Amino acid sequence: MRISTSQMSDAAAAAISQRQTDLFRTQAQINSGKRIMVSSDDPVGAAQVALSRTALDDTNRWAANQNTAKHSLSLTEATLGNMGDALQNIRETLVAAGSGVYDASQRASLAQELGHRLSELVSIANTDNGGGGFLFSGFKDRILPFTLSGTSVGYAGDQGVRSLEVNSGTKMPVTQNGADDFMNIFNGNGVFSSAATVANGGSGVITVGSVINAALVTGHDYQVVFNAGGTTYDIVDTTTSTTINSNVAYTSGAAITLPGIQVEISRTPSGGDTFAVNASRQTSLFNTVARGIALLGSGNSTWRANELGATLQDIDRALDHINLKRAEAGSHLAQLDDMASAVADRALEHTGEISRLEDVDYAQAATQLAQQNVALQAALATYSKNTKLNLFDYL
Amino acid sequence: MQTTSHNISNVNTPGFTRQGTIQATPQPQYTGGGFFGRGVDVQTVQRIYSSFLTEQAHYANATASEMDTRATQLMSIDSIFGTSDQGVSAALNKFYTALDYATANPSDLAARQAALSSATVLAANFNQTASRLEDLRSGSEVQITSSLSVINQATKDIASLNDSITFALTTGNTPNDLLDKRDNLIRDLNSQLGVSIVKQSNGAYDLFTGSGQPLVLGGSAFSLVSAPDPFDPQHIVIGFQTGTGLMQLNASILNGGKLSGLIKFMEQDLASAEDGLGRLAATLADAYNTQHKLGVDLSGAAGGNLFNAPAPAVYSNTGNTGTATLSASVSNASALASSAYRVDFQGGNYVVTRLSDNTKQTFATLPQVVDGVTLSVAGVPAANDSFIVQPVRQSAYNISVVPTDPRKLALASPVAATTPQSNMGSVASTSLTVNGPTANANLTQTVTLTFTGAGTFNVTGTGTGSPLGVAYTPGAPITYNGWTMNLTGTPVAGDTVTVAINAGITGDNRNGLTLGALHSAAVANGSTLTELMAGLFTQVGSNAAGMAAASQAQGQILTQAKSAEQSIGGVNLDEEATNLMKYQHAYQAAAKVIATSQTIFDTLLSLGNR
């Protein structure tokens, strides 16, 4: 084929320009460390990088939320632990008070001590969340949840539970509220509670009783009413106002059977004395402590004995409840620990994927750079050699 | 030797075709002794030329120029989009993260401010990317205008050359350099606009555009002009000025050249990038606005729009004769497509064309919903009235963040459920969600569910219709007044659950959680926003890469066509040097003949002197 002179220089210029472009590109890739600098470098890869980057950011968000959750849950767990310890102390004080060796003034000082313990409980329940709010206010986290007036405690929070997304599609509750934890605890044994009436004239003391057949439990309130002389009693269903059993002979310490449950009354009740066996109701643990303080102030030893049994049972219920809530926070913390490593693994996977897609392979790039360098040198050398071959030089 | 010297002088002249001297032996002289040769005559100077190869090079040049222009412009779009660690994509991820942090700390004003700021940065990134795309559009329009003046100058010059050539040919000789000049002008013209040549018998070339519109007829040229777009006077269209108005040329009837490349780029590539980005912005705004409006802010007020995205743009053709005005609104953001639409009123029907793929739908009446956009009309259209609807073109350009006060971020839910201490059963609310897309008017009315037993409850509250004896199944959703609640546990007769206006808005993050979940929700026709973004990267990247590859391939074809043309018509200096030596030798030999004749003649003359 005939080659024209301008064609030779045009082709050489084009070849040199192309080699320089290639070289520049490889150099830019090495400088930036990126194989994909614009999406046209690898359109499918660029899209995958975009998806992986969002996925990586997701794992970072989950990890951040896990830290927030961990902080909130460990604070909750520790606070509930303190609450349990304080409640345990109160229980011991009450047990000691029940031994009967204390006189009125000693009981009064115990009551005063319990009063301090109660305000300690309130201040624990008002623990702040480390972020300018309160731990147990529910959604009303800027409002002081518990206020003590006398021995009664009011709750100003709500039943809100804050959740966070801690893993793909997994929302975990990270707060607990005062209503669920401290205010709404079923009293008695969770099914029923027993109590004596304060005006009882006899020395009858009722036990906390037990459930003997859960299937028969009605959820009704009952009253054991002693007839004149205190030797027989009637059982009245106060929910329906019907007497379900009348003139039952009384034996001290013998089981008194109600539908599904039984209680025992011992010592000597008088005629007209009444004992209530009610379905469990929700009460606050502060209320339970206040009940303990109230009983210490009473001069009626029978009443004190009746109240002490019921109060200790309620405190045990409260302790169980606090421990349950503490275990709930603890199990969430354990889940978080498991998730943390899973999320870290995923993050590592995504980082690797992004790097694999996007980062330049230095060994390959360096080799390519050397090759392109040689190619450019060759193009330059051949052009300058070729242009020297000119017939006019020989004329 | 003069021709050789001409060839050598023009070795670097673009478009020059080498010339050769055609020599011939003249009529021999007859004498008694036979025919004697009379030496040599120069017949003519001829271009060494193949019109087929030249035309092939012209065509290759037009196509290569179109593809090169498009590839260069597409690379600009590509670099505007960049990679996913910068720009809109990165801002989107940062927005998700900041919103998530605010959700984890709903009462922290700094966290809320950070979420708002990241939303603002996201909007700014959309604006910036869209405005750089818009700059590409106006830059392309400037290039079109300058391309038009190059084209018009070239056609004018070609027309006058046609005249000169026709005249020169009447002398019987070929005006080689004029022909070269005309071919070179046509080559230049082709790199701006692909033309087809029709050769006339008088030597003139008539030039036509790809669609057969005459540009040059003999000695007269027709000018291409730019005019304001009849739909949108901000932009331009090109065409021929005719007696009845502008005869518009669009991408489908142009073929080859920079002008065609620019118009195709604007009509197809740039439009799809702008619409793609706009669709992302519009979908994002709609999804977040809808959910944000279902929440309440720190003051307890219902959330407003989080983003402000413009409504679809509708342009009427300035030539419309009817009284109709078309309006468009987004009715289903998820169904939006990355396209603009053309609505023509033809034969009593509305023909809606999706411009990205030219799919047509015909409707006898409006309103109708097309790809999530409701089109409605007021007034009466005349036949052939037309409108352009751009549902998302402006969305990215104009998206902004509405709230400026971090307290206005609606992270809380407007309602909360409570179970009182007096309940004797274990019934509890596990979730309470607000149903969209718009909040029920009675949403925050107090509704009380009073259980009449373990399996039934009565409802009281405005808007519920206060039904009695509703069956209760633990875990089954209960829906009234635009909320849905799940209850667990066993109730006892007399237990209540109350749903009322939420007072605990500082620590409530329920709406924030739902907002946060939007990033992994399929809000765009089955895709998430991230997938939409990734799709945009693939689209932009593969368009640019594809066009660059095609342009490179066409560049090879052009090089080959040029080589073929040059192999016939190009000047090779070595060849000219040999020619020069050949003519020099011939000259020297001829001179020798003269010298020898001189000697002989001198000898002859000297004979007389003796």
Image: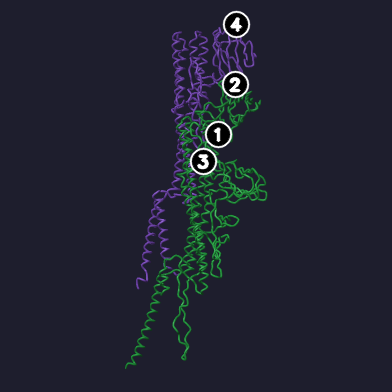
Chain colours: A purple, B green
The front one of A389 and A231 is: A389
- Provide the residue designation for mark 2: A213
Name of the residue lying farthest toward the bottom: B610
- Image height of B367 relative to A75, above or below: below
Do pointers 2 and 4 mark residues of a single chain? yes
The image shows residue A111 at horizontal and vertical percentages of: 46, 12
For the residues labelled 3 and 2, the Cα–Cα distance comes to: 68 Å
- Provide the residue designation for mark 4: A229
Picture quarter containing residue A393? bottom left
Give the label, 3 or 1, closer to the camera.
3
Do pointers 3 and 1 mark residues of a single chain? yes
Give the label, 1 or 2, closer to the camera.
1
For the residues labelled 3 and 1, the Cα–Cα distance comes to: 17 Å
> Which residue occupies 34% across, 93% down?
B608
The image shows residue B311 at horizontal and vertical percentages of: 56, 41
Amino acid, disc 4? Gly
Do pointers 3 and 4 mark residues of a single chain? no
For the residues labelled 4 and 1, the Cα–Cα distance comes to: 72 Å
Tell me the element at label 3: loop
Amino acid, disc 2? Asn
Does residue B550 appear in the picture of this structure?
no
The image shows residue A78 at horizontal and vertical percentages of: 44, 26
The front one of B517 and B596 is: B596
